[in-house]
Image: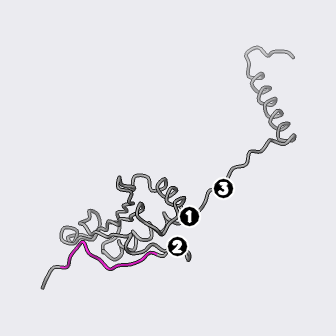
Amino acid sequence: MGVPDQGASKRVSLRVTPGVEIPDSDLEFRFVRASGPGGQNVNKVASAVQLRFDLAGSRALEERVKTRLRTLAGQRLNEDGSVLIIARRHRTQDQNRRDALERLADLIERALIEPKARHATRPTRAAKERRLQSKHKHQRVKRLRARFPIED
């Protein structure tokens, strides 16, 4: 009986939202030995999952979303433009695979949210008056703390 190839896996496309689906050709799974939970199995079974998402080559996402995803990915972004997620929280490959996919989907979901443009506003007259009242009150407190009170 042959040993299954640990680099190969079932092909699964990732549905992030109803309108966004990452094709399985953009995802690559590798299974490696993990530290952490697993007992004696940890030395024998490759249960940790490395999920690589080819961000640079993916056509599933718009360029603006890719730019936001690059920022959100941080250190998980490789030089070759792919996002690497390592999942080793669980004892089994299947649970770690699901965990990695969920984490990638969460990251992409956050990148899909377009930040709102900030519109400059001016403070209201009441806000200016409250600020000045607060400053005046603080000034009075400081004066009362003085060793020799200053007369107005």
Labels in figure, total: 3
The extreme left residue here reads 1
Depth check: give the residue in front, 23 or 35: 23
Mark 1: amino acid: Leu
Label 1, residues with CA under 10 Å away: few <14, some 14-19, many ≥20: some
Mark 2 or 3 closer to N-term? 2
Q: CA distance from mark 1 to mark 2?
A: 9 Å
Secondary structure state at the residue bearing disc 2: strand
Depth check: give the residue in front, 69 or 136: 69
Q: Residue at x 54, y 58 (%)?
A: 64
Q: Which residue is mark 2?
A: 20
Occupied quadrant, residue 152: top right
Q: CA distance from mark 1 to mark 3?
A: 12 Å
Q: Which residue is mark 1?
A: 112
Mark 3: amino acid: Lys
Occupied quadrant, residue 35: bottom left
Secondary structure state at the residue bearing disc 3: loop
Q: Which residue is mark 3?
A: 116
Mainly helix, strand or loop, the magenta region? loop
Depth check: give the residue in front, 30 or 36: 30
- Please give left or right for residue 144 compared with residue 104 in the image: right
The reply to whether callout 1 and callout 2 are in contact (CB within 8 Å) is yes
Tag on residue 47?
none
Residues drawn in magenta: 4-14
